[in-house]
Amino acid sequence: LISMATATTPRRAEKRPLEAAKAPPPKRRSSEISAVPSPLSASSSSAPASPSSFGASSGAASASSAASSPPSRLFKLLPDGRTVHREPPLPTGGIAAVAEALARIGLQAYAAAFDAEGYDDIEYLRGLDAAERAEVATETGMKPGHAGRFVKFGFEPP
């Protein structure tokens, strides 16, 4: 048996230094990257932030890079860093319109059941006759009193 202490390992050849042409560019810190003006920030009216204004935290660097991007028509950036809609989207369809119609007739408790069963098209639901509305009421698990009101009046308040 050969012991590990007596076994010799071949020596590695020493590494050669890279030539200047083959050397990769030096790595930049995130604060240096943000301080470099981009083509987008040059066209905006805000002046680029100075490197001394960057904090050590990554939140300050991300907030400064978000400020240099062009403004959005749909979203706005809050001071705490969250992005929100400039205006809430209008309930023009989908389950939001169905939930609104159910709320008008006092049956908003069934909005989740309508969504779960796939009834998210308000125009389709408005076009149903009484027998089809009865089937929808059964599929969504409406109580008998609620189902009778839904079948009789549809989405129109009594």
Image (cartoon, grey):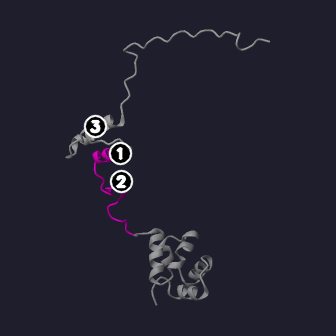
What x and y, as percent, mark residue 77? 32, 55
The answer to whether residue 67 is magenta is yes
Residue behind mark 2? 81
Residue behind mark 1? 62
Residue 35: numbered disc? 3
Helix, strand or loop at disc 3? helix
Determine which quarter of the picture holds residue 56. Answer: top left
Q: Which residue is at the front of the view, 68 or 90?
A: 68
Helix, strand or loop at disc 2? loop
What x and y, as percent, mark residue 118? 56, 69
Q: Amino acid at mark 3?
A: Ala
Query: Image point 65% across, 11% down: which residue?
Result: 9
Label 2 crowding class (10 Å Cα cut-off): few <14, some 14-19, many 20+? few
Query: Image point 40% across, 22% down: which residue?
Result: 24
Dot 2 or dot 3: first in sequence order is: 3
Helix, strand or loop at disc 1? helix
Q: Amino acid at mark 2?
A: Gly
Q: Is residue 135 left or right of residue 35?
A: right
Instruction: Tell which residue pokes out farthest to the bottom in this image.
Output: 158
Image vertical order of residue 76 relative to residue 30, above or below: below
Are the two marked residues, 1 and 2, in contact with CB atoms closer than 8 angstroms?
A: yes
Give the spatial CA distance, label 3 vs label 1: 12 Å
Give the spatial CA distance, label 2 vs label 3: 19 Å
Residue 49: numbered disc? none
What x and y, as percent, mark residue 61? 34, 43
Dot 3 or dot 1: first in sequence order is: 3
Give the spatial CA distance, label 1 vs label 2: 9 Å
Start and end of the magenta stretch? 62-90
